Amino acid sequence: MTFDFHGKVVLVTGAAAGLGFACAKAFTDAGANVVMTDIGQESLDKAVEELRSAGAEVFGVCNDVSKSSDVSAMVDAIVERYGKLDIAVNNAGTASPLANFHEVTEAEFDRVIAVNLKGVWLCMQAEIRQMLKQGEGRIVNMASATSRNTYPNAAPYVTSKFAVAGLTRTVAVDYAERNIRINAICPGNVATPLVVSMVKDLSVLSAKHAMKRMGTPEEVANGVMYLASDLSSFSTGSLLEVDGGWNAI
Ligand SMILES: NC(=O)c1ccc[n+]([C@@H]2O[C@H](COP(=O)([O-])OP(=O)(O)OC[C@H]3O[C@@H](n4cnc5c(N)ncnc54)[C@H](O)[C@@H]3O)[C@@H](O)[C@H]2O)c1
């Protein structure tokens, strides 16, 4: 099974590591021009270099998705270089250490919401402004299995991911007749730096899934490519679970 994204310009936020890197690699393997963005300059440079040395057409932009000026500059840089933005994968995200809800600080709530919710909000606004000019576009937001399900002592993260699902669905309806499709992917647990920082014992995480194993970054990237491709042409406002059956339990 292969996808073909030759001639497409694809933005992946938070692309220096984990699921974002896997998505960037999958799109370059499928022929796309990929713009990789991340808050970490050093890790971004390394990730860009890794794909470039494999022959991919990639371009890196260091930014913070929670800052509107950074986000507008990111889309401006893409349009200046390629003249368009076909596909945006709003993946950048953060997590917080597991903690009792009554002990979570206001600062921690603000930090997680700023990246996971406001970041997606700002990216979608800037991307949609450009997509309206083009008359088309596709957006895939990185939600989570915890956009519909809960996880103990992870209220800031779970709250942010429920909100991303709501944001995806409501904005998808707003632009459904203007040739902009907006969907979200809901991964189960994949062993990335973010997940390992929250939960050390991966067996606890695989036990959440009906399949009783962890997902892989490539399995999530496959779902993202499906939502970004013509194969999902009648889907907008959908939440695609790639979670080993977690939400079916
Ligand atoms: N790994 C999983 O099991 C899993 C499951 C469901 C959803 N997700 C979601 O997938 C996305 C990627 O997660 P991951 O597991 O690959 O994490 P990760 O920590 O490996 O990668 C996230 C990347 O986002 C970047 N980032 C963080 N804050 C940023 C900001 N303000 N601006 C720009 N970039 C920023 C980080 O530097 C990092 O490179 C997140 O939205 C996460 O919530 C992950």
Image: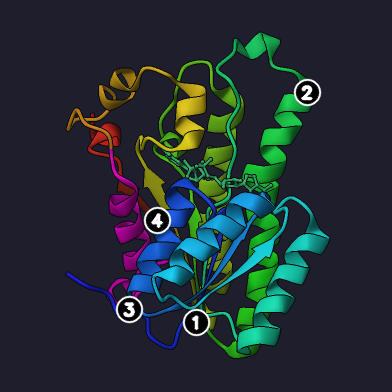
Q: Residue, x 60% and y 80% (percent of image)?
A: 131
Residue 157 in the image, given as x and y percentages of width and height: 57, 31
CA–CA distance between discs 4 and 3?
20 Å
**Which residue is tagged 1?**
179
Q: Earlier in the sequence, mark 2 or mark 3?
A: 2
Q: Earlier in the sequence, mark 4 or mark 3?
A: 4
Which tag is nearer the camera, tag 4 or tag 1? Answer: 4
Q: Are marks 2 and 3 in contact (CB under 8 Å)?
A: no
Indicate whether 131 appears above or below 48.
below
Residue 18 in the image, given as x and y percentages of width and height: 45, 46
Indicate whether 77 appears above or below 62.
below
Q: Nearer the viewer, residue 9 or 238?
A: 9
Q: Residue, x 60% and y 87% (percent of image)?
A: 82
CA–CA distance between discs 2 and 3?
42 Å
Residue extending farthest to the right is: 69
- Asked which secondary structure carries label 4, the reply is helix
The disc placed on residue 106 is 2
Q: Are marks 4 and 2 in contact (CB under 8 Å)?
A: no
The disc placed on residue 230 is 3
Q: Residue, x 16% and y 69% (percent of image)?
A: 1
Kind of residue indicated by mark 4: Ala
Q: Earlier in the sequence, mark 3 or mark 1?
A: 1
Kind of residue indicated by mark 2: Glu
Numbered range of the magenta stretch? 215-236
Residue 76 in the image, given as x and y percentages of width and height: 73, 77
